[in-house]
């Protein structure tokens, strides 16, 4: 299959159902909480908003969906407080939506009556900054699902069609975002998601266990076709986005460096790189399992063995 066909197929079987299930859940929770406006945070919220716009038309017409240009960098701007006030983020009955993982933007918004909806959270959130509502896992809810979750790959499935928000400026009496020129090549992913939502039906929604199963397969046992396409996505973990690397590539790297990540460059998708280089995935899984157990002492070894056999690592 060509690149477009692989993206379309992956969106139909994985990205679309997973993201739609998350968005449907958060819309239900927002409705129960009396929230009437949701702000989807750039950039992970771009495709989530596409899904929400479709779902709200039929099932949640009272909820307004808006897009908020922000980032960990732009939140440090002197104009950030004025921008979020202008957009109405601090008004009553408001929620924010993001992928995760620490809830730092919610902290920077600094509003004690706001609710943040997140796919997952690695941290506990911040005090006096409102409520944190994780979908798949948190430090309390299914905390063991955090182990082996690849946030870098997940974020790359949530494409946007613009660069990072690096700050704000005043223009014609309004505060507008300033975007970086590093715009991702995400047209195919966005188009595939729009096609998926046009044909969407509730029968395609997944349980949280099914969501986890789909993602863990993609994270840790991807096909070579999937890696050859999604591994080309450039990703930068640093806040300033100064150093971009592909999620997975054929750079000559020893299996020791790939497992331990002791290298000058990051390996965002260890399993994907292993597939491209022909390394046995079982070695990557066992090694990552040992590292996770070592780093997280509270992980029960019997649970870890079960998860190892199920392919989570």
Image (tube, rainbow, N blue to C red):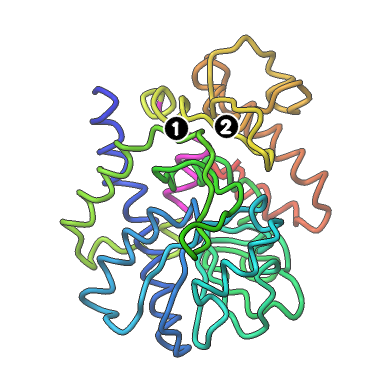
Mark identifier at residue 274:
none
Q: Main secondary structure of the magenta part?
A: helix
- Residue 293 within the segment the image draws in magenta: no
Q: Which of the 4 quarters of the picture holds residue 150?
A: top right
The residue where tag 1 is placed is 222
Question: Magenta stretch: residue 215 in it?
Answer: yes
Q: Assign a secondary structure to mark 2.
A: loop
Cα separation between marks 2 and 1? 10 Å
Q: Do the residues labelled 2 and 1 touch (CB within 8 Å)?
A: yes
What is the secondary structure assignment of the residue under circle 1?
loop
| Residue, disc 2 | 269
Q: Residue at x 54, y 25 (%)?
A: 246
Q: Quadrant of the C terminus?
A: top right
Q: Position of residue 171 (x, y in %)?
A: 49, 57
Segment tinted magenta in the rendering: 212-223
Whole-percent x, y for residue 243 in the image: 65, 28
Left or right? Give the position of 171 relative to 224. Answer: right
């Amino acid at each position: 299959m060509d690149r477009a066909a692989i993206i379309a197929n992956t969106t139909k079987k994985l990205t679309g159902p997973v993201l739609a299930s998350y968005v449907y859940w958060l819309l239900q929770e927002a409705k129960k909480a009396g929230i009437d406006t949701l702000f989807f945070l750039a950039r992970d919220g771009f495709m989530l908003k596409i899904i929400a716009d479709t779902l709200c038309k039929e099932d949640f017409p009272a909820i307004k969906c808006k897009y908020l240009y922000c980032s960990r960098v732009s939140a440090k701007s002197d104009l950030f407080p004025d921008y979020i006030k202008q957009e109405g983020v601090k008004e009553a009955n408001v929620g924010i939506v993001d992928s995760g993982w620490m809830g730092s933007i919610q902290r920077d918004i600094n509003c004690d009556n706001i609710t943040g909806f997140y796919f997952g959270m690695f941290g506990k959130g911040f005090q006096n900054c409102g409520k944190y509502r994780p979908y798949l896992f948190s430090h309390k809810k299914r905390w063991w699902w955090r182990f082996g979750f690849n946030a870098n790959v997940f974020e790359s499935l949530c494409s946007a069609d613009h660069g990072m928000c690096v700050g704000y400026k005043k223009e014609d009496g309004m505060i507008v975002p300033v975007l970086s020129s590093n715009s991702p090549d995400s047209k195919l992913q966005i188009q595939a998601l729009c096609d998926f939502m046009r044909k969407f039906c509730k029968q395609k929604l997944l349980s949280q266990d099914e969501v986890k199963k789909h993602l863990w397969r993609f994270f840790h046992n991807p096909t070579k076709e999937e890696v050859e396409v999604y591994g080309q996505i450039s990703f930068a973990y640093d806040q300033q986005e100064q150093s971009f690397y592909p999620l997975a590539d054929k750079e000559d790297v020893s299996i020791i460096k790939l497992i331990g990540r002791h290298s000058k460059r990051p390996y965002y998708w260890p399993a994907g790189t292993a597939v491209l280089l022909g390394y046995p995935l079982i070695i990557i899984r066992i090694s990552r399992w040992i590292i996770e157990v070592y780093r997280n002492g509270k992980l029960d070894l019997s649970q870890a063995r079960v998860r190892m056999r199920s392919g989570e690592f």
